[in-house]
Amino acid sequence: MTEEHSNAWAAAAIRRVGADGPQVAPTPLRRLPLAAIRDIQVYLKDESAHPTGSMKYRLVRAMFCEAIASGAIKADTPVIAATSGPVAIAGAHFASLLSLDFTAVVPARTPPEVLARISGEGGRWQIAEQPPAAAQEEARALAEQFGGHFLDHFTDAERAMAVCGEPTVADEIFVQLSREQHPIPQWIVTGAGTGATSAAVGRHLRRHGHPTRLAVVDPENSAYFPAWVSGCGDYTTGMPSRIPGIGRPRTEPGFLPTVIDLMIPVPDAASIAALRWLRTAAGIEAGPATGTNFWGTCHLVARMREAGVRGSIVTLIGDTAGPYLNTHLNPSWVHARGLDPAPYEADIERFVHTGEWPAGARPV
Ligand SMILES: *Cc1c(COP(=O)(O)O)cnc(C)c1O
């Protein structure tokens, strides 16, 4: 293919990726009424409404655009990822849209439903020969062998979002809130996996000079909270997070601590309690990381009330409940892990109905 032709392919491919599906319209911003709390409006930006059911859709879309624009993905480049998570599903989705070959190198115990979703989006999968830590290298080697592109979300998503990420989740939030009572939120609350979403939101706030602050919630075992507190850029816990999508055993290169105003460590049992509350009391079918977001949001709403501040606060629904019905949403799975969400569920109930938050009673 001549340069001219490959550039024409690239331009068409970027248009195609950018114009995919119903996401051209923004994902919904939903108001979450809390009975006793009338002066503060809580909103959930529903990122599970993307065609692949997860906020990773936005990141992978930006990574495809950036890789195509910089010549790393061409008309015949196979794309390879090293995950069975939502990045694999979104990767298969965009590769299929561009008629590119896609392979996910997945861990040995990946559930058949997850493999079926990758296949359903037109991708292939192969079981990693190496343990998870080395699967990255295996995927990279596979990409090299076949002249492919390794979709390395922990290294590339944050930069891809900065270069090719528009509209970002923050762009959409500010447009959607402009029609509401408090158009400039006091806080935006998110978790960090790759760190790309929090980086994109933080950059947006500075570029536009908004007074909104960015809070990042962090689950147990994650390196991010200690990294942020200590200023140590290579902090490592070596322990996996139990909340899918957020919390990492090491400080990933896409994590941008300088844009984060506050980090809130959230106990895993509190994340699960919040997830259950959202499901049973508010009818919101979300994944565990949304529980973590909601716990952190309650904490900040309580702080706003204490300070007599009215206004709005926005957090994200990161993915859907479906993949977690047998795990985080299954009481025996939760119990078998020594987690007891009951006291935290009681805290949320009391908060919603009285506005009282157990500040200091338990770890935030
Ligand atoms: C990936 C993920 C996050 C974190 O987003 P990053 O941009 O990777 O930091 C939050 N929630 C869910 C459900 C995710 O899958």
Image (tube, grey):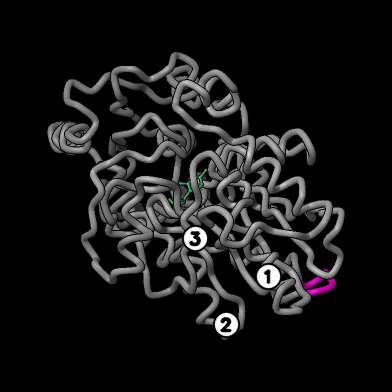
In the image, is 229 to the left or to the right of 86?
A: left
Residue 296: image quadrant is bottom right
Which residue is found at the position 43% from the left and 17% from the top?
Answer: 111
Q: Is residue 336 visible?
A: yes
For label 3, the residue is 264
- The secondary structure type at the circle numbered 3 is strand
Which numbered disc, 1 or 3, marks the residue closer to the eye? 3
Residue lying farthest to the front in this orientation: 361
Of residues 15 and 220, the one drawn nearer to the viewer in this rendering: 220
First reached walking from the N terminus: tag 1 or tag 2: 1
First reached walking from the N terminus: tag 3 or tag 2: 2
Contact check, label 1 and label 2, Cβ < 8 Å: yes
Q: Residues within 10 Å of mark 2 (few under 14, many from 20)?
A: few
Q: Which residues are magenta?
A: 178-182
Where does residue 228 sit, x and y in percent of width and height? 35, 67
Q: Is residue 124 above or below residue 158?
A: above
The mark tally for this picture is 3
